[in-house]
Structure formats: C-alpha cells, structure tokens
Image (cartoon, rainbow, N blue to C red):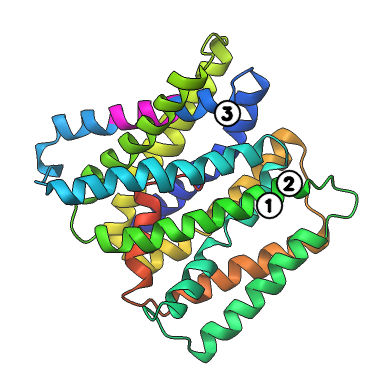
Amino acid sequence: MGPVLCLLSAACFGAMAIFGKFAYEAGVSASALLLVRFGLAAALLALLLLVRPGLRAPVRSRVAGTALAMGGIGYATQAALYFAALQIMDASLLSLILYTYPVLVTVAAVLLGRDRLTPGRAVALLVASGGTLLVLLGTGRVPFAPLGALLAFGSAVTYTVYILVADRVVQQVPPVPLSVLVMAGAFVTFAGHAAVRGVALDFGVAGWFWLLCIAVVSTVLALLMFFAGLRRTGPSTAAILSTFEPVVTTVLAALTLHEFLTKLQLTGALLVLTSVAALQLSPSAASQPGKQHSRSAAQTG
C-alpha cells in the first residue's frame, strides 16, 4: 500500500491547479482562495490532533514560533505566487515550472555545503536545466505568459528557500503538529491581508465546492496519504513517486481545461521529471528531510 498511497497523494496534489482554475471561473478571488484553503486545512488538521492524541507531541515555544513564521512568510509567499501565476497561465505549464524546485534544492544544498555534487548529480542537473529550457521555449502555438512564468519560477525559488529552512525544523516536530503550525501561520498572514484589503466571500455554491476540494482533497487528504505512504516506503521512494504530481496536472488539464503541451514541451517535461527522480536515487541527509517536509506543508502549490 505504500507506493499506492504516495501515488494517490501525488494525484491529489496534482489536481489542485485544476481545482484552482475552476474556482477562479466560479468567481473566487485569489485572496479568498488562499484564506479559505489555509484556514480550513489548519482547522481540519487541528481537529485530527484532538481526535488522535497519539499524533500530538510537545513543541518548544521557539520551534513553534519558527514553524508559524515558516507558514506565515515562506509558505504564504510561495502559495501567493503560485495562485497568482495560475490566474494568467496554463495549469500544466505552471506545474512543470514549479516542479523545478527539487533541482533548485539540490543546487542550493551543494552551494551551502549541506550536500556534495557527484558526477551523476551534475549530469541530472544539466539534463533538468535543458528540460526546463525546452518547456519554456517550446510553446509553439500555445499561449505563453512571461509574467506567469516569472511568478511560477518565483514560487519554485521561494519553495526552495522554505525547504532549506524547514530542514532545520522538521527534525524537532512530528509532521502533523508541524503542519498545523505551518497552515495556521499562513492563515494568519492571509487573514491579516483580508482585514486590511478586504476579501469577498459572496461567491456561489460552485466556488465553495472547489475551495473545499482544494482544502480537503489537495491539502489535508494529500498530506495525510503522503505521510502514510512515507512510513511504508521511506523518503527516497516517496520522493520519486511524487514526480507523478505534474503528470496528473498535465493529464487533467488536457481532459478538463483543454490545455495541451507541445511535443517539445513534453520532451522537456520528461527530462525534468527523469532528472528529479535520478536526484532522489542517492538521497543525502541534507536533501531528504527537506523533501519530506515539502509535502508536510504543501501544495505542490
């Protein structure tokens, strides 16, 4: 069941961009989407801790403060950039650009001295860079939004920084309590933004339905299934299976939104995903905790 749970988790995360597109079509604003997503996710995970005492653990105040800041600053920024990009570009292309973050994490870890660059990793990084270039340049007749691509890459960079910071915290707090703190931190940020700028929550039933899908399916269920799969498969296998996420986004986008990648982009996507999987075949102490935590706080998005 371990691999199955990891794949189901990736599928749930991969569907988030599709749910987001439908939420926008139903009149939901990005600020409302983010506010409801993190508020509902934090509440549901906190409820899980209440009914499952075995998942609880004491958290030192300093660590709790760091986790809240991770959510309120790092994860909130990443999510805001992601959903801003989703408003102006295809979901499939956004997913592929975002999924360069495992490569960015590896590069940053090497530069910071937390990891070492082996010949195999160097080749994987070069192949991933070439694949990303093909994804961006191989648009053909597909509409391309430079601002959207910039926002998507900014989301990937922010996620990279967030993961590197999380690497120091994830060892000190169990995953579910840590996720509650991160989600709560992000919710506080967007609640503060809503208090200052205002937010419209008067959209219809369809809008609330897609928000529930994002919060319940693509956040809480995806997160819990990843944890369950991680316990059964180990971090390296779970990380490799997570590359199924952008595949799901691309397929669902084609089926529901009629978004299609060009042959050149599909080739680039295959290169990127293969490189990401190859980078996980020789996990290091530095990169794997971060990879585990990248799901403990997530979206792929």
- Looking at marks 1 and 3 on the same chain, the residue that comes earlier in the sequence is marked by 3
3D distance between C-alphas at marks 1 and 3: 17 Å
Kindly give the residue lying farthest to the right in the view shown: 141
260 inside magenta stretch? no
3D distance between C-alphas at marks 2 and 1: 5 Å
Q: Is residue 18 above or below residue 99?
A: above
SS class, disc 1: helix
SS class, disc 3: helix
> At label 3, which amino acid type do we have?
Ala
Can residue 225 be seen?
no
Name the residue: 47% across, 72% down: 108
Specify the label residue 147 is tagged with. 2
- Where on the picture, by quarter, is residue 115? bottom left
**Secondary structure, magenta segment, majority class:** helix
- Where on the picture, by quarter, is residue 86? top right
Q: Is residue 288 above or below residue 57?
A: below
* Residue 73 in picture, x, y percent from top left: 40, 44
> At label 2, which amino acid type do we have?
Leu
Q: Are marks 2 and 1 in contact (CB under 8 Å)?
A: yes
Q: Are marks 1 and 3 in contact (CB under 8 Å)?
A: no
> At label 1, which amino acid type do we have?
Leu
Of residues 286 and 22, the one drawn nearer to the viewer in this rendering: 286
| Residue, disc 3 | 30
Q: Is residue 209 above or below residue 159?
A: above
The image quadrant where one finds the N terminus is bottom left
- Looking at marks 3 and 2 on the same chain, the residue that comes earlier in the sequence is marked by 3
| Residue, disc 1 | 150
